[in-house]
Amino acid sequence: MKIKSSGRRKFLKNSAAIIGAAAAGIRPAGAENPPPEMDMPDLEALISYGQRSSFVKSHRVSVMERMSPDEFGMTFHVLSPIQDSVGIITPSSLHYISTHRGSYVPNIDPQEHRLMIHGMVDRPLIFSVDEIKRFPFVTRPLFLECLGNRAKASHKTVQETHGLTSCSEWTGVPLSILLNEAGVQSGAAFIVAEGAESVKGATSIPIGKAMDDCLVAYGQNGEALRPQQGFPIRLLVPGFEGMHNVKYLRRIKLVEKDYMTYNDYGHIVPDARVAALTRQIGPKSVITFPSGEQKLPGPGLYEITGLAWSGSAAIRNVEISTDGGQSWKLAELRTPSYSMAHTRFAFPWTWDGKECVIMSRCTDELGTRQPTRAESAKFFGKPDNADFRAPGADNTVFPWRIAADGSVQNGMA
């Protein structure tokens, strides 16, 4: 590759200056204190799996309402540090965790694990994990979100307000392939999927969804599922709330109606408007920078950035307001917009140093727009006050308040 003459002369000139400085015993700028050696207590382990820089401190935290692990050594809800995320993929080690109350993470030998498909089928089948991996596979970026991902005025960071969502690249076999192997009988309207935890978490899913885009996943972000994410296999139900995505999948029964299962208890409601939002996540977005407990050093140009997602389609656009919702401007989508996956957005913004409220809202490809809190309250016939909580999955617009000193706080407070 040729180097332009002007660039080559500049390179040689800079190189000569560095060499001359070294000969005179002068260190280049930034080299006054050589970096410390990496802390490598186990070099073999470092080579075999690797570790991140000691300067990177992103970590998961427990939800405010229940600490994990609890006094019995169990985890419940653990929040992903989305304020530190870049792009759209959540590292497997930082993916949010949601487990059933009273259930430990099982340590399952994949050679012993089996998946049974039975009920309203022509041929009841039992698959080993190795047999499942012999079927044609797909890899897709998909988000997961717990229904408990709801902002409160007491939450201080975006990890606390929105940390029960993550997006991974999942690899597995389309569930439709396995169901076709078993032969779906006419009249089968739902599947009941069951996991291998001690509480036997299960859920009912419409047969149309099961045959459309569900996966029996065994891979996450290029490696095997982590135990906290359902090793050795789990069900992925794109766009549906987290509890439908059964971990440690061991049984699928085809049935004629919607069964009340352990997972469904407390989630099934008679109001169709709420039921729709309970099963499938509506379009949702949140600004991750600047966000709670971060601070802008002073007036100037910044990139507002965050994540948007929808449980029914890809994201079409994201809008940003820097005046508390009085006006909106289009943000840029900085990553491809995949169906039912996180999308990264950004908006160049010059802050004038005055107090303001920033927020984002998104619209998916079906034309559904993320509602404001007031719009949601009106839809459900409720007063828009401090006591209002959106029924089902809360996908309302969330505000951040930036003070004159640059500090960022929850705008609900």
Image: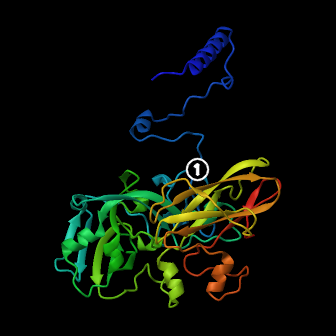
Q: Which residue shows up at 66% across the image and 23% down it? A: 31
Residue 46 to residue 135: above or below: above
Residue 4 to residue 204: above or below: above
| Residue 113 in view, yes or no | yes
| Residue 73 in view, yes or no | no
250 or 243, which is in the foreground?
Answer: 243
13 or 224, which is in the foreground?
Answer: 13
The image quadrant that residue 394 belongs to is bottom right
**Mark 1 surroundings: few (<14), some (14-19) or many (≥20) residues within 10 A:** few
Q: Quadrant of the C terminus?
A: bottom right
Q: Which residue shows up at 29% across the image and 75% down it? A: 252
Q: Position of 15 compared to 275: left or right?
A: right
The amino acid type found where label 1 is placed reads Ser
What is the total number of numbered labels drawn onto the structure image? 1
Say which residue label 1 marks.
58
- Residue 164, given in percent of the width and then of the height, sits at 54, 65
Q: Position of 147 compared to 104: left or right?
A: right
